[in-house]
């Protein structure tokens, strides 16, 4: 990978991919800056800029405690209802209709 021609987030994704473990954001960003051989006069500004780019890129996943990983490392979340069964759109539509009908009945009773 040609780090000098790559964007900061491309380099960050590469660094995480190679590390195979989440990294503390400052360590990740410093690694990006080192690989890109950036002469940083305003370190706080550079960190802020790269952090913003990582935060906005869907390839990255915040894991907590200031650490970032790759989204591909995490299985997609499955949304479940209160009873643990998967919700279907038909059930959602039926429940939504029932709530609307009750609300409408309540409005009519008030008049």
Image: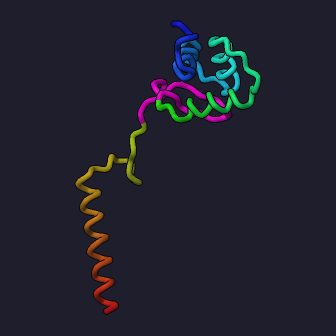
Q: Is residue 70 magenta?
A: yes
The picture places residue 25, in percent across and down from the top left corner, at 66, 27
The picture places residue 31, in percent across and down from the top left corner, at 66, 16
Q: Who is closer to the viewer here, 61 or 102?
A: 61
Q: Residue furthest bottom?
A: 111
Q: Residue furthest top?
A: 1
Query: Which residue is drawn at the image coordinates 39% and 47% (left, top)?
Result: 80
Q: Is residue 19 magenta?
A: no
Left or right of 3? Residue 30 is right
The picture places residue 83, in percent across and down from the top left corner, at 39, 52
Quadrant in which the C terminus is drawn: bottom left
Height in image: 94 above or below 48?
A: below
Q: How many numbered discs, if any?
A: 0
Left or right of 57? Residue 37 is right
Query: Which residue is drawn at the image coordinates 31% and 70% (left, top)?
Result: 99
Query: Which residue is drawn at the image coordinates 67% and 32% (left, top)?
Result: 48
Numbered range of the magenta stretch: 59-76
């Amino acid at each position: 990978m040609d780090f000098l021609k790559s964007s900061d987030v491309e380099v960050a994704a590469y660094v995480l991919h190679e590390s195979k473990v989440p990294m503390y954001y400052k360590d990740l960003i410093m690694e990006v800056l080192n690989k890109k051989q950036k002469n940083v006069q305003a370190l706080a500004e550079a960190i802020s800029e790269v952090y913003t780019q990582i935060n906005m890129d869907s390839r990255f996943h915040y894991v907590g405690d200031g650490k970032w990983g790759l989204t591909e490392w995490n299985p997609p979340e499955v949304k479940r209802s209160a009873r643990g069964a998967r919700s279907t759109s038909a059930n959602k539509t039926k429940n939504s209709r029932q709530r609307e009908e009750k609300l409408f009945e309540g409005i009519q009773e008030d008049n």
